Amino acid sequence: MRHFVYKTLDELRRAAEEAGAAHVRFTASPAEVRQVLARPVRVGALTVGNSIAIQPMEGCDGALDGSPGELTWRRYERFARGGAKLIWFEATAVREDGRANTRQLWITRRNVADFACLLARIRQLHDEYCGGAEQLLVPMQLTHSGRYSVPRRIIAYHNPHIDRKTGTPPDYPVIADDELERLEDDYVSAAGLALEAGFQAVDIKAVHGYLLSELLGAKTRDGRYGGALENRLRFMRNVIGKLRAAFGNRLMIAMRMNAFDGVPFGCDFETPYPYGWGVDAADPLREDLREVKQAIACFREWGVDLLNVSLGSPYYNPHIGRPFEKPDEGNYEQPEHPLLGVDRHFRIAGELQRAFPDLPMVGTGYSWLQKYAINAGAHNIAAGDIGFVGVGRGALAYPDFARDALEKGELDERRCCKTLTYCTYLMRQKNHPLGQFPTGCPPFDKEGYGEVIKLARHAARGG
């Protein structure tokens, strides 16, 4: 079903009002859009040169040893020239069993020089095309994929609804406390390598159902890392403390965090719902941000300088995390008007940013708005509802969108992502000689991915 049928900003504004998406509002003036998005943002001891962020978009295109591949380099070269001053570097595993696919990036002693060369190239190109590379921030997102790791899943606790979605037996073992404690040191080691490669910041990724995200919602887990909120925050507290002890203030700490997990789409859930993070136990289709705010207060106290807010899981309720126009092949149709999904993102991120005005946050959920994403972002920044406008899928389609936003105050409709989820389709394709097809935007980047999607579809048909 086609939802985005709007020819003007006024049409979209009226549609948001009619849908009840009260938090989706816009700045109309191109001059004001330019002015707001050009605002520098203070992040810890750094000044980031504008208020536009590129979200961590995995390309699934690394080498088998975890080092960046040819398409990885190409993607970040395009981002570097694009004008955003916050380029959030994609999920990079801290150890081999934490990779979500065989081509996910993984930083090691053997390939740290490759990451250093790529980062240097990002900074060089950004300075050449945009200027002010000293105001460019590139945090490396450190991850363990947990339940979604290959070839062996590692789970933090049993949620029977997610277990059914992922084919996890009810007696499958959960990761032990002692192993989690050892994993903390793997995060510190990977962060040290990131610092050696020249990254100024690392993101302790706790989002989208991966291991640390599961720990946040592990209310039914026994032991030191489950149950009470203090225990569920233990891993993050320990890692941040160890990072500070090892590196002092030489390394900024960021976090991309779920604020609302929701429930797996289509499941028959019980109430009170005893699982998940940021969910209302009495109505888990809605958020309850009390624990989320307690956690953010702790993160701020422990030294987190930048927070990136997201929702849901691409594995079991993708409409929550990324409102779409068309599902990837084999997935369900959008069960709500996408404007309501965008509104959920803006409502939750806005409440959190207003609660912690001294902690800059990156907002999500903009891509579905297409050319009007920057109008919504400018409004949210001006209202104090977010620090950075974060664009993910839209940057794959239109990597220099930020330059157009800053120079013209408007985007080229012909180049905007239409949220048709070709990128997700490619990410799900595993029938490749390296175990994973690379992902990008075939409709708007035919040079990079036109042939890739042809090969992926041929392989999916058994060719």
Image (cartoon, rainbow, N blue to C red):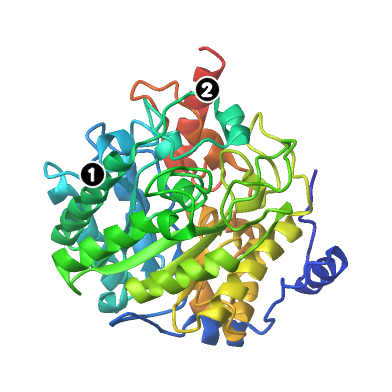
Camera-nearest residue between 416 and 258:
258
Q: Is residue 405 above or below residue 358?
A: above
Q: Is residue 354 left or right of residue 273?
A: left
Camera-nearest residue between 177 and 333:
177
> Sequence order check: which comes first, mark 1 or mark 2?
2
* Residue at the disc numbered 1: 182
Q: What x and y, as percent, mark residue 265? A: 69, 40
User: Hey, which quadrant is residue 346 in on the image?
Assistant: bottom right
Q: Name the residue furthest right.
A: 18
Q: Is residue 192 above or below residue 66?
A: below
Q: Is residue 348 left or right of residue 133?
A: right
Q: Amino acid at mark 1?
A: Arg
* Residue at the disc numbered 2: 169
Query: Which label sits on residue 431?
Result: none
Q: Residue at x 56, y 38 (%)?
A: 315
Q: Residue at x 51, y 65 (%)?
A: 390
Q: Is residue 82 above or below residue 185?
A: below
Q: Residue at x 41, y 30 (%)?
A: 153
Mark 1 crowdedness (10 Å alpha carbons): few <14, some 14-19, many ≥20: few
Q: Amino acid at mark 2?
A: Pro
